[in-house]
Image (cartoon, rainbow, N blue to C red):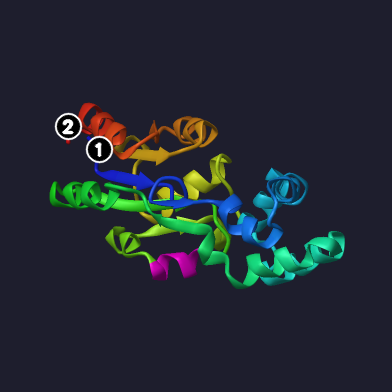
Amino acid sequence: MIKNIVFDFGGVLVTYDFYRFFFPHFKSHEKTVAFMKEVLTKEVGDEMDREEIPFSLYMEQLKRQWPHYAEALDMMDKDYFHIVTGEMPGMTELMKKLKSRGYRLLGLSNWSSKVYEVMEKYPIFSLLDGSLISTEVKQLKPEADIYQTFLKRFNAKAEECIFIDDKPINISGCEKVGMQGILFQSTEQLEEELKRMAGL
């Protein structure tokens, strides 16, 4: 029996757009894309989300490595919450429906400590009954340990959880520890999947 509906944050509860954030600085498609490809690699993203050192200190490291991108990196440090562009359309209504049916709503996200600025700005996060964020435990999806830490923190059984994420690799990760997963494509698609899997 499903008791817990677990949400990723970026790309599921809120939308984000790095290109739109950085374009006004570079004023060029080519320069913006070059910056994102050269600097904002998967490895850099993982380091930010695991946050072994504070975010601002990591930005200082990147500025030493990429001095000609120092201003863009300063923007990312000081105005990070503007990368997030809004709440996912229709998701607040769906989450309220899930809560009215008695499901516990939880969050599980790879994100740096900058996430707290985002959570303060967007009311959708107040609908969660709790969350586990990678920066808190220095663990990342899709590694098994973060899912196991999540289950332990919330005293949840894997078979009683459905996890929703927009990245297939993270869905595979949750399934390896016994959770069911839904690959998010749209709120409408998610609601249909939940009707099938949880009897919503």
Query: Is 117 in front, or is 195?
Result: 117
145 in relation to 159, above or below: below
For the point 56% across and 39% down, the residue is 142
Q: Position of residue 16 (x, y in %)?
A: 49, 52
Mark 2 sits on what residue? 199
Instruction: Specify the principal SS of the magenta part.
Output: helix
Q: Amino acid at mark 1?
A: Ile
Q: Which residues are magenta?
A: 115-121
Q: Earlier in the sequence, mark 2 or mark 1?
A: 1
Q: Is residue 144 left or right of residue 1?
A: right
Q: Is residue 54 magenta?
A: no
- Quadrant holding the C terminus: top left
For the point 78% across and 47% down, the residue is 38
Q: Position of residue 93 (x, y in %)?
A: 21, 50
For the point 53% across and 48% down, the residue is 146
Instruction: Check the image and name the residue furthest to the top.
Output: 196
